[in-house]
Amino acid sequence: MNAPSGQLLRIGDTDLWYDDRGSPDAPPLLLLMGNGCGASFWPEPWLELLVRGGRRVIRFDYRDTGRSSHIASFDQTPYSLDDLERDVLGLRAHLGLGKVHWVGLSMGGFLALRLATRHPGTVASLTSMMSTPDYATLLHTFMGSEAPISGLPPPRQDWLEALSKIPPGLSPLELAVESWRLANGSRAPFDAEYWRGLQRLAEARGDDALAGDHHRRACERIPDKNQLEALRHVTAPCLFIQGSEDPIFVPAHAEAAARAAPAGKRLVIDGMGHALNPAFFEPLAQALLAHTGAAPRGP
């Protein structure tokens, strides 16, 4: 399946690039990627599995990634996760969607969870992958912001130490690939050339290193980083998927979220880290298709 060219949508003063595929009558999945990552990090083979499974799949570039609007200076033009939320809700409204299946990964998983707690009328279901109900656990570690009050564990110390030992002088491309290798964990296969290709595609579409810092700062600007209590009021089906080897958000994060949500379920995938590794496309797609409705269709 060839990737569609996508479209630009103007929301306020922001251009938002999006890609909408699958039958218009199929259950809509709105995909939210992680910190600093544009739509190209939802790879084509993964999208094909979902569309073949009978889903309408919508992905987009956050502001500061891909073909969406970029800013030169966060200090001069700051924004918060609330603004990213408004972008997403604007896209949903533009497409004329009612309830959607929110699907997010890492920061996108937290954004999806927050959409579910703050806008329950938009939620057909929630799937939060490789994420957390308390983003302060990450921000406190990397930015020194307020300490988390949820009691959830911070990123693993061995991963933080490995990050600190990345050799200086790597090119931006090789630095990104090494970061993916460490996030992937030690048990899952890691094809460095695959990740180089994905990074090159993202860079060709406009992703750059500034986006990660901008998105972290955007998350730091919200007061409600801990959503555990708010999750108790989300009645839609919720699925929290974690990798057993995720060094950033260990499985305890998914367990806490699943306990809090009245219709929450947890799925821990053995060997998976904090990366959308092709080795796990099939089990992730099967879990998502089962969670969002009808049984998957054959190839």
Image: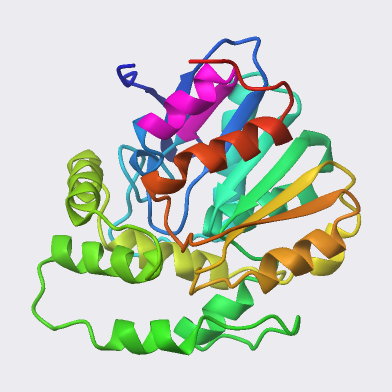
What is the x, y in percent for residue 88?
Answer: 58, 39
Residue at point 47% right, 33% down?
A: 59
What is the x, y in percent for residue 270?
Answer: 55, 60
Q: In which quarter of the image is the N terminus?
A: top left
> Is 43 positioned to the left or the right of 169 in the image?
right
State which quadrant residue 283 falls in.
top right
> Is 222 positioned to the left or the right of 235 in the image?
left
Question: In this figure, what is the number of numbered marks?
Answer: 0
> Is 287 positioned to the left or the right of 11 in the image?
right
Residue at point 47% right, 68% down?
A: 216
Residue at point 21% right, 41% down?
A: 201
Height in image: 172 above or below 5?
A: below
What is the x, y in percent for residue 247?
Answer: 48, 74
Depth order, front residue of 297/30: 297
- The answer to whether any part of residue 51 appears in the image is yes
Height in image: 252 above or below 259?
A: below
Residue 51 within the magenta-colored segment of the rendering: yes
Height in image: 100 above or below 135?
A: above
- The answer to whether any part of residue 230 appears in the image is no
Depth order, front residue of 69/291: 291
What is the x, y in percent for residue 154?
Answer: 58, 83
Q: What stretch is highlighted in magenta?
A: 45-59
